[in-house]
Amino acid sequence: MKDEILTGSRLTFKAVTLVVASLLPMQNSWAQTYTSGQHVEPAFEGWRPNPDGTFNMMFGYMNENWKEAPDAPVGENNYFEPGDADRGQPTHFLPRRNRFTFEVTVPSDWGDRELVWTLNVNGLERKAYATLKADYLVDNMVIASETGSLGAGTSSPESRANIPPVVTVQGDSIRAARVGEPLELDTLVIDDGLPDPTDPVEEARAFAEFAGGALAAAFVTEENIMQRRLMTPPIKVTVNKVNGLYYSWNKWRGPGDVKFDPPQVKVWEDTRTSANSPWGALWLPPPIPEDGIYEVNATFSEPGEYILWGRADDGGLYHDAWITVNVSE
């Protein structure tokens, strides 16, 4: 009996040790990166059909800088061809990778032509070539996978049932403001609650209990889970993203800086610790307002015409809105 007890204790201790060891930091290597001075790479993300027979070509970009958010007005350094140079693209580029940022509608008879987006930022010209080739067809599962909500090539009944949030900006789509004076922005966001918000502590406890039983699960705490997320982000073919609803305003176009209060969740893939980004190691979904209305103040540094971009994202899918603000002295 004594030997059986000792054997059982050793097995339990071994299971606990394995679970706790899996929470310890591992060494990461980092590629060379830059804060400023680098170019912006336009990206064709794919296309999807519309009910009326037209097609939406989807674009994003990779800003090679971690800090600099350059501006490139529509013109010789930021244009589409053939046709109109202005297809609603951004002229302000947030840092790093921004996927599925905007869409351009082309007619049903577009055929095998290419739509080309050209950017020249910090002296380096780059182009993205968009076509309707079958290999580039995008659906909701592709979006969720590419942005990191799902693992590559995976899905679930929950993810397949997910529909994008619905955004309704309260008030006029064209506003007036003055330099230095906050402009209140209220936005109603309705979502279906899918996918379930990420709870890393509960997920780890469930794994620990499966691997080592209740005793192993008891060793899982929020502190050591966050330490593991901090030091050893999961290794995936695609980026890793925390699922959970948020709404964020950002500058799309405009001559000056725009500050938002409270600070907005980042829509770009910032993987750094405490970066207020769904791709960050310690990020958790913010509380959802009881009435569904997100309240934000925007303050402008210079006069001129601005376009602000709002995005609601549930982790897997998104919905966008834009407003124009004419700012005077």
Image: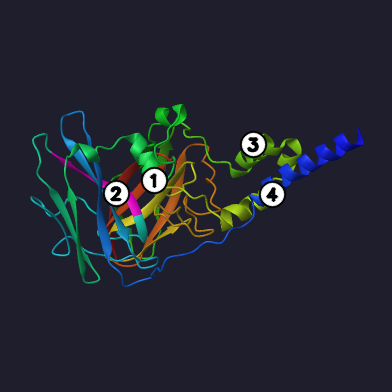
Q: How is the image coloured?
A: rainbow
Q: Which mark is residue 21?
A: none
In this view of the protein, can residue 318 be seen by the observer? no
* Residue type at numbered disc 4: Val
In percent of width and height, residue 104 lies at 20, 44
**What mark, if any, has residue 147 been given in the picture?**
1
| Residue, far right | 2
Task: State which quadrant residue 140 falls in.
Answer: top left
For the magenta stretch, what is the residue range? 98-106
How many C-alpha atoms fall within 10 Å of the one at disc 4: few (<14), some, or many (≥20)?
some
Q: Earlier in the sequence, mark 2 or mark 1?
A: 1
Q: Which residue is mark 4?
A: 20
100 in the magenta segment? yes
Residue 26, quarter of picture: bottom right
Which residue: 38% across, 70% down? Answer: 34
Residue at image location 21% in from the left, 33% down from the top: 49
Judging depth in this view, the residue of 18 and 315 nearest the camera is 18
Q: Tell me the SS state at disc 4.
A: helix
Residue on which disc 2 sits: 323
In space, the residues marked 3 and 1 are separated at their CA atoms by 25 Å
Q: CA distance from mark 3 to mark 2?
A: 44 Å
